Image (cartoon, helix red, strand yellow):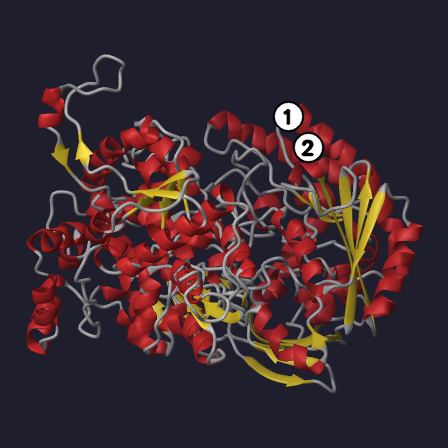
Amino acid sequence: MSDLEAELRKAVRGDVGFDVTSRALVTMDASNYRRVPVGVVAPRDAEDVAAVLEVCRAHGVPVVARGGGTSIAGQATGTGVVLDFTRYMNRLVALDAGARTAVVQPGLVLDRLQEAAAPHGLRFGPDPSTHSRCTLGGMIGNNSCGSHSVAWGTTADNVRELDVLTARGERLRLGQGWAGAPDGLRALAEGELARLRTGFPELPRRISGYALDALLPERGADVARSFCGSEGTLGVLTEAVVSLVEAPPARALAVLGYADEGAAAESAAGLLPYGPLTVEGMAADLVRSAAELPRGGAWLFVETGGESAGEARARAETIVRAADVVDARVVTDGAAQRALWRIREDASGTATRMPDGTEAWPGWEDCAVPPARLGAYLRDFRALLTAHGLRGAPYGHFGDGCIHVRIDFDLLTEAGVGRFRRFSEELADLVVAYGGSLSGEHGDGQARAELLPRMYGDETVALFERAKAVWDPDDLLNPGMLVRPAPLDSGLRFAVLPREPVDVAFGYPGDGGDFTAAVRRCVGVAKCRTTTASGPAVMCPSYRATGEERHSTRGRARLLHEMLAGEVVTDGWRSEEVREALDLCLSCKGCRSDCPVEVDMATYKAEFLHHHYAGRRRPAAHYSMGRLPVWLRWVSRTRTAPLVNALAGVRPLAWVAKRVGGIAVERDIPRLAGETFSRWWRGRGSGDGSGDLVVLWPDTFTEHLSPSVGRAAVRVLEAAGLRVALPPTLRMRGRPVGDGRSRSAAALLTARRGRVCCGLTYVSTGQLDHARVVLRRTLDLMEPVLETDAPVVVLEPSCAAALRSDLPELLHDDPRAARLAARVLTFAETLERHAPGWRPPRLDRPAVGQTHCHQHAVLGDTADRGLREAAGLDGELTGGCCGLAGNFGFENGHFEVSATCAEEQLLPSVRAADPSAVVLADGFSCRTQLEQLAGVRGRHLAEVLAQGLDEGPEGRPEGR
């Protein structure tokens, strides 16, 4: 392969990667399959593509085209050279609003085309659920559809012309009237006209096999359309001319409730004459909460369009009257529609979990039958699942007769894989019996191509092979797909993973304590590869900053998968490739909530660092910032904060300190407080409040760096009538005596002083042995609190998240950990639950800022929203991550990415805010980032409310 690599580097202007990381990142797509390539090339243009084909043809090495890598049948993986079109060939070349066309490169993400077309009232019709990361090239390769196909068809229905390179280097411009047909294709088709007219089932979602019937003269001999859905096996797409459709100015959504799934399916076809934009269906077994849905056990989501909201509503209401429903709801408000669509999207099969959390897998994701026969098919499909002892929750495009489902196949054992094959064969027969297509949207790939003879018969499949030979006589392009396919039960991506549990530190409760199962969560749907964060979403800031796959959640999961497999990544926990990929993970935990399958890369990173540095010297930042609580307590005990601040203000000394401590030289060292929060607490005297007792957690940041936050929180909590206490600082030695709670005099004399700590800095740097020691000491100190009903109020979101999630997962063998985690409340949650009758001061000011990423991912912000609303703080906080993320943004080499993350949403929102706006930032990292990059002082919500209390309704101290 060294000769191949050298020749490619000489011939190609784009990127050539034969290294471990490049290969490991593309061993899988979003399917059950895995193929290891020899290398990856990111071509810059069509000339590069031609050069790659020429070199690979000379070496007899296959070539596989890859877009977003979200295919779920295995067709975006390969053993030869993978072409990554997303890096450079990702442009919108031209958009002609008058002609309603666009010229696109294969790596262009669909959402970028939609954004460009929207100002002209246009859009690309097909819209797969992966629209934020799937590419036009991939959509053409798979003939993708989406929820609006009942109105605007499949991708093939929206393609006009295609520029294609054949494996032998021929450049073709495909279109109608045999335009661009390779030599021999016309003769092949005209010799099989009878078969082309009778051998292809007529249904809206026939995606399986080659669309050779598009070459019929009565269908315009459309070579471009016949190329769609060929999964990269006939030629390599370099540019496409696609049609755009008019987007209706207004839309309405009718949600129709039915008694059960069968009734909904049988009703769907009858709604098509009314011209809906969507007819999507799902049943109650996929809905977490049906509170916002009309009554029923299954629902159809029917969208209508119009020139006005009234016209769209009228069409929706007509459909409601025509449907035999249990209940219905029609919505025209955009926000309400989005909320309802989220219920449908949350139910989608991109989540590889059953409703009870067990694993489920693709493979039979999108079979399609004639819409009028969908109800009967679904009943037989459910019966077939039961007969094989399998479970699945169907949903999907009921109006097109296309059903998505993830099934709880056991793909880890020989017996389970055998059942997977038997079920696949029987389901293929069932689909064919209903006149259906094995694939109705996602293509055949390796998952279904082996079964195409059951659908088309041997002679038509032989015709497919002859067509492949016309286009690609050397079988160079994506071999093993569609024709002469690999067996559907071979090359499963799980086969290479270890069968015995891996020794790990965290408990992984959602995965039965199995780190391999945790890594297995990522199936590659690539929601982490979005280039813009929408709404409150956080995942994945490092990918958005760099645009590199290895810095996405999926990319890191792929490298961990290959680390466990040991074939491509061979160094195990010592792997430098994995360490480098994880280095730019901010540990923001965004993937824990935003990933459809709740991949928790922050935890995986901590686990990896724990093993990677075991018995070895760590980076300097792990000592300087990973053990920050130790250094700050030492400064507090010696009362040297003023001296430290003074030394940090001397530039040469600060530079040396940063170099020694592994801190980015671009950063200022934060100033330490002259008086810690605990020292202020001890000197304040007795507090007010006669209500519930709450224990206020003095986290490291509040204690030493922002004690004003703690003081403000005490002011507000006591104003709300609560009694505030701090955690104990004495850790008793010896067992209780007498009543089980009292301690002997000896125990009191030998008690040790200590401070509670959530262990966050140790966890984030992978010092998990230290974290365990710190957390066990904390649990010892907190035992008296755990004997009461008092909640533990944590002001710093990252510390609250550590206590609520990291603590019980790291000390999974200590029942006290779960008890403490259950007590942890945020500042707003405490007021909501323990002072429900209290009303905060009315501030009536706009608010800007960013919801802390850990709060979004772990804690939730419902209580905070309610508290802000009650205080008259108007405005939505942004999503994303501030980019500082604890130690991350301070570490040497991370400043650029850290600043890029801040510039994505946080800093622009603050700069654009009204001068009177309150800048909210509950996290110390967020406040520090604002101060150092924008010169803006952010404040904790407690500080803002405390100021409001002191000023009173007329700006004077209240009651004083």
Residue 923, located in which quarter of the rendered image? bottom left
Q: Position of residue 26 (x, y in %)?
A: 42, 56
Residue, disc 1: 388
At a point 21% along the width and 14% down the height, the residue shown is: 737
Label 2 is placed on what type of residue? Answer: Glu
For the residues labelled 1 and 2, say whether their Cβ atoms are less than 8 Å apart: yes
Q: Position of residue 377 (x, y in %)?
A: 79, 37
Task: State the separation of the CA atoms marked 1 and 2.
Answer: 10 Å
> Total of numbered circles in the picture?
2
Q: Quadrant of the N terminus?
A: bottom left
Q: Give 896 or 669, whichever is nearer the viewer.
A: 669
At a point 20% along the width and 39% down the height, the residue shown is: 774
Residue, disc 2: 426
Q: Is residue 344 left or right of residue 359?
A: right
Q: State the SS at label 1.
A: loop
Q: Quadrant of the C terminus?
A: bottom left
Q: Is residue 245 above or below residue 143?
A: below
Q: Which numbered disc, 1 or 2, marks the residue that appears first in the sequence?
A: 1
Q: Position of residue 234 (x, y in %)?
A: 59, 64
Residue 390, located in which quarter of the rendered image? top right
